[in-house]
Amino acid sequence: MIIVDKIGKNFGEVQAVKDVSFTAKDGSITTLLGANGSGKSTTLRTVAALLRPDHGQVTVDGICVQQDPLGAQKLLGIFPDQFGLYTRLTAREHLEYYAELHGMSGAALENAVGEVVSLLHMEDILERRTEGFSQGQRMKVALARAILHKPKNIVLDEPTRGLDVMSIRMLRQILLELKAAGHCVLLSSHVMAEVEILSDHVVMIADGVVCADGTPADLVREAGQPNLEEAFVALTAAHGRTAA
Ligand SMILES: Nc1ncnc2c1ncn2[C@@H]1O[C@H](COP(=O)(O)OP(=O)(O)OP(=O)(O)O)[C@@H](O)[C@H]1O
């Protein structure tokens, strides 16, 4: 479980995140939904201990990310906004390297790599260097790297960006399987259809502030709108009027 409590983060003059709080539960998919520049990535990077907030704190399964970033990162699988693959390494070498970073070796390492390779159907790209990989192939390596140590909590920053329909369906299926296995899945998106299909809990962010949260059905009801897209427009506009 991930608890974000009143975090804020400035970059110089830019208030990227002003006041964000929410809880992402186990066995559930929580989605941060917001427009470009609303603060989703900054929030997720704070959860992942890649950024230190100016105020507030994040706990992951009871461990405070700010006090014990390495301890929290052991409980997290992180799928970042930039894949950051090493172009000279093969997909297998990436996975083995990350498995070693997580303290695995020998048969445990081989089993962990074998499991994610089979889960993500990566057999055909395993021995290829990642240079020149398509977006879908890069997504597979990044996702495999994020989940190979079986973290209880998985954080994904816009995981479907640039993917074709079949890759999106595969990713969606894997996220649903992780949820069914009791994992806490926290992601960001601005693709309404995807959010509506996948999310148990939606946290709407506008201008660095949470303007509404609940199930997609709750939010549609709260806004009195026919669907999540219209609800998003109405709730973020209402927030803008309140903030002005
Ligand atoms: N390292 C940084 N330095 C300066 N400004 C930053 C930095 N990171 C984020 N920002 C600014 O903070 C604000 C929030 O950015 P953030 O990336 O968190 O938004 P986002 O909701 O993830 O947007 P998108 O959907 O476009 O990825 C933006 O105005 C952005 O320009």
Image (cartoon, rainbow, N blue to C red):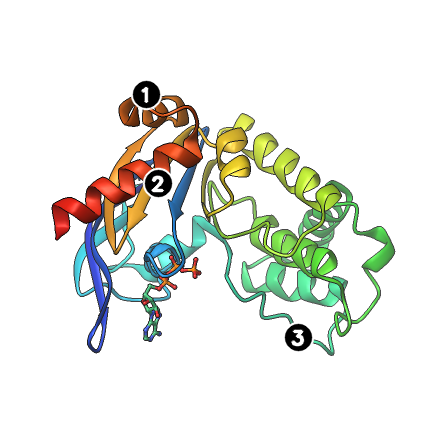
Q: Which numbered disc covers residue 86?
A: 3
The percent coordinates of residue 83 (x first, y second) are 58, 65
Q: In the image, what residue occupies the spot 58% across and 37% down?
A: 175
Relative to 143, is 177 above or below? Answer: above
Q: Which residue is mark 2?
A: 233
* Residue 63 falls left or right of residue 79: left
Question: Real-space Cα distance between discs 2 and 1?
Answer: 14 Å
Question: Real-space Cα distance between discs 2 and 3?
Answer: 39 Å
- For the residue labelled by badge 1, is the local secondary structure a helix, a strand or a loop? helix
**Labels 1, 3: front one:** 1
Q: Are the residues flagged by discs 1 and 3 in contact, CB closer than 8 Å? A: no
Q: Earlier in the sequence, mark 1 or mark 3?
A: 3
Q: Which residue is mark 1?
A: 221
Nearer to the camera, 93 or 217: 217
Relative to 193, is 99 above or below? Answer: below
**Labels 2, 1: front one:** 2
Q: In the image, what residue occupies the spot 29% across and 59% down?
A: 68
From where the camera sits, is residue 25 visible? Answer: no
Nearer to the camera, 206 or 73: 206
Q: Residues within 10 Å of mark 2 (few under 14, many from 20)?
A: some
* Residue 39 falls left or right of residue 165: left
**For residue 119, which quarter of the picture?**
top right
